[in-house]
């Protein structure tokens, strides 16, 4: 990803309240704010334009992060129509300062965003896939550039919607992929900017160990992953059906080993060096 200079303006001086974000040499602009400041977010001039928007919150049934991705020729009017939805508590919208985003452009962006979000699977999507729009080749390229800048700004504004779960940390450790093994189970993973990811196809032990009784969090997390289909029984082990990001190497190792574990020691390189050693060498 190319380097970038981001300009963030805190309208009230508070990073949790209304803010705008721009990139140098880009005609796009983002506006973000909490639902508690709904009126202030929508009275801005930018909401009279066409663009794409994100409503984020928590799914009331599953407790998982949820998001609605939409497009509109008039952002203000469209977002007002979502007041009946009670799951969301944050809004982010993107528009263009030169007013060159057409209905076809934003429909294309919405479709691409929904496709990527479904692949990344960090959020429960609150709507079905859109039909998108056919664009001339030059317009498609322009929108792909627009989308790349959105990918840069969304995390800065508090949303990891388009960041793949298995994305490694920027500075790779020399050991490459790490392994955690216990009683025949074998998991593969690596550090990420937000913690540690266990890769799809990894396996975990079926039975919890005695130490799990002292750490109810481990049992609760394993049960949650079993309930949502992330862990399924196969050939005497639990199989990871998707990449899963944990808060730390120890949290990941605990789920794999069915009890308390020190991830700095349990995760090793192919040649046996432990994660703690790699950290010390970094």
Image: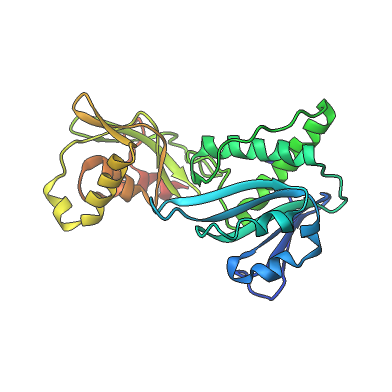
Query: What colouring method underlies this structural image?
Result: rainbow
Instruction: Say if residue 140 shows up in the picture.
Output: yes
Q: Is residue 61 left or right of residue 192?
A: left
Name the residue located 83 percent from the left edge and 50 percent from the top edge: 27
Q: Position of residue 15 (x, y in %)?
A: 62, 69
Q: Is residue 115 above or below residue 11?
A: above
Name the residue located 15 percent from the left edge and 39 percent from the top edge: 207
Instruction: Quadrant for residue 81, please give it.
Output: bottom right
Name the residue located 56 percent from the left edge and 59 percent from the top edge: 84
Q: Residue furthest left?
A: 210
Instruction: Quadrant for residue 181, please give it.
Output: top left
Q: Is residue 168 above or below residue 75?
A: above
Depth check, front residue: 258 or 46: 46
Q: Position of residue 19 (x, y in %)?
A: 69, 66
User: Which of the image's four quarters has the N terminus?
Assistant: top right
Q: Residue furthest top?
A: 235
Q: Position of residue 25 (x, y in %)?
A: 84, 50
Instruction: Say if residue 2 shows up in the picture.
Output: no
The total number of labels drawn is 0
Name the residue located 49 percent from the left edge and 40 percent from the top edge: 121
Q: Is residue 263 above or below residue 105?
A: below
Q: Is residue 226 left or right of residue 29?
A: left
Q: Position of residue 205 (x, y in %)?
A: 21, 36
Q: Is residue 228 left or right of residue 49?
A: left
């Amino acid at each position: 990803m190319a380097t970038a200079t981001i300009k963030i303006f805190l309208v009230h001086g508070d990073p949790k309240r209304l803010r705008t974000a721009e990139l140098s040499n880009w005609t796009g602009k983002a506006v973000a704010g909490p639902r508690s400041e709904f009126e202030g977010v929508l009275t801005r001039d930018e909401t009279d334009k066409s663009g794409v928007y994100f409503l984020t919150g928590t799914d009331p049934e599953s407790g998982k992060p949820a998001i609605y991705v939409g497009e509109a020729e008039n952002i203000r009017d469209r977002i007002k129509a979502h007041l009946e939805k009670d799951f969301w508590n944050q809004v982010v919208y993107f528009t263009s300062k030169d007013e060159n985003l057409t209905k076809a452009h934003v429909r294309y962006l919405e479709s691409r965003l929904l496709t990527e979000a479904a692949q990344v699977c960090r959020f429960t999507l609150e709507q079905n896939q859109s039909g998108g729009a056919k664009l001339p080749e030059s317009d498609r390229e322009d929108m792909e550039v627009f989308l790349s800048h959105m990918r840069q700004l969304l995390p800065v504004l508090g949303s990891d919607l388009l960041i793949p779960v298995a994305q490694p940390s920027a500075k790779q450790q020399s050991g490459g992929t790490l392994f955690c093994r216990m009683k025949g189970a074998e998991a593969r993973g690596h550090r990420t900017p937000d913690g540690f990811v266990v890769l799809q196809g990894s396996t975990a032990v079926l039975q919890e160990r005695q130490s799990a009784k002292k750490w109810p969090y481990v049992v609760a997390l394993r049960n949650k992953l079993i309930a949502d289909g992330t862990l399924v029984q196969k050939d005497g082990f639990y199989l990871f059906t998707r990449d899963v990001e944990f808060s730390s190497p120890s949290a990941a190792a605990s789920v794999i080993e069915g009890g308390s574990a020190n991830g700095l020691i349990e995760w090793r390189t192919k040649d046996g060096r432990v994660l703690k050693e790699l950290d010390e060498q970094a």
